[in-house]
Amino acid sequence: MRLILLLLILIPYADPAAQSYETGKGNVTGADPSGTTFNFLMLSFDFVTNSDFMGRLSETVDQPAFSSTFSYIGKSGIDASLTGFMIGNSDESLEHYTSEVDIMLGYRKELFGSLTLYPAYSHFFYSKKSNDLQKIFTDELHLDADYTYKFLNLGLSPIVYLGRQRTFTLNFRNFYTINFSNVILNNSIMSIQPGVDLNFGDFEYLNRYYLDEMKENERFYEYLLLSKAIRQYAMVKKAQNPELTVYQILDQYLNEKIQDTFKLTSAVLYLPVSYLAGNFGINTGLYVFLPVKQPDYLYNEKQFFFTVGISYNLAF
């Protein structure tokens, strides 16, 4: 979920004057807010059709989310944001809404004109009714390194997640920004940012989480059995070893799978579009999530996400 919202938040701060050049159809420009000479306040309201974070447990249950974000971006490079979420189908029954609040503090520094570094820290607060898996991480540390040359934007982000489990991921991104000026209204900008993200990591933290939790709470066996592949595995093993219970079979499965290697885990294709007129903005986007070599208990088919939002920006 946080990945998608970060992608959404890039667009409103794009500087249309930064490293742009003329094409036959519009301006192509790097969307790097670090060179701004203003302070910004932004209030936004967004909706995403599915907000599963590090993998999808159910083949039939989506988790749509409504969010509201208040952000400050300073010309000194410091920024901070407060985001509240209402997430559908995110309680223990996967039927009701729960809430989440995220706070983030970061600092953006431009180096050599084309390279930008952005270290940031986030902390996540969850409502008591949130699904236990939803609350597996409470803190995030990441360092974004982005290189911009004309229309080319390349980025690399090492990310550490902390909480009841810990894991390290690496995100590589490549996107292009195309700006069109004076669309419909004077002094307006429409931005299109097609791109791709490659995500690297491992699922050992998730295997260990399930193994630990199943020792204390039997409902985690039910989570595993939501997967068609796991159900089929358990049925085959039960036929081969009728003396074993389903619980014993799943314990054995996780013990065999617990160790994992660092690898490509997913790719995300995205096409966000934003329209800014004065202080107001509208954004929308289509995202395609492509899982790669994920555990059998996660949904391994491609997923489509659609986003839409409005924002109000104040420069001072």
Image: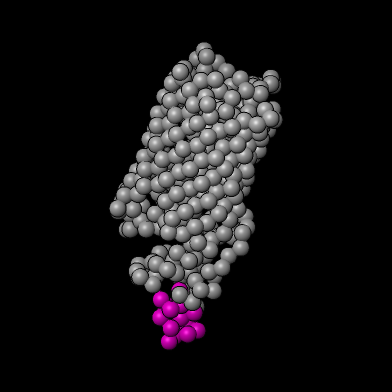
Q: Residue furthest bottom?
A: 243
The reply, left or right, for residue 38 in relation to residue 25 is: left
The answer to which of 70 and 248 lies nearer the viewer is 70
Magenta span covers which residues?
237-250
Q: Determine the image quadrant of residue 213.
A: bottom left
The answer to which of 162 and 254 lies nearer the viewer is 162
Q: Is residue 140 visible?
A: yes
Query: In the rendered image, which quarter contains the C terminus?
Result: top left
241 in the magenta segment: yes
Residue sitting at x 69%, y 21%: 21
The reply, left or right, for residue 272 in relation to residue 244 is: right
Residue sitting at x 42%, y 68%: 212
Q: Residue furthest front?
A: 76
Magenta stretch, main secondary structure, is helix
Residue sitting at x 40%, y 47%: 124
**Image location (x, y in percent) of residue 224:** 43, 66
The answer to which of 92 and 58 lies nearer the viewer is 92
Residue sitting at x 34%, y 43%: 86
**Image location (x, y in percent) of residue 169:** 57, 52
| Colouring rule applied to residues | one colour
User: In the figure, 262 relative to 218: above or below?
Assistant: above
**Image location (x, y in percent) of residue 273:** 53, 31
Q: Is residue 275 visible?
A: no
The reply, left or right, for residue 93 in relation to residue 182 is: left
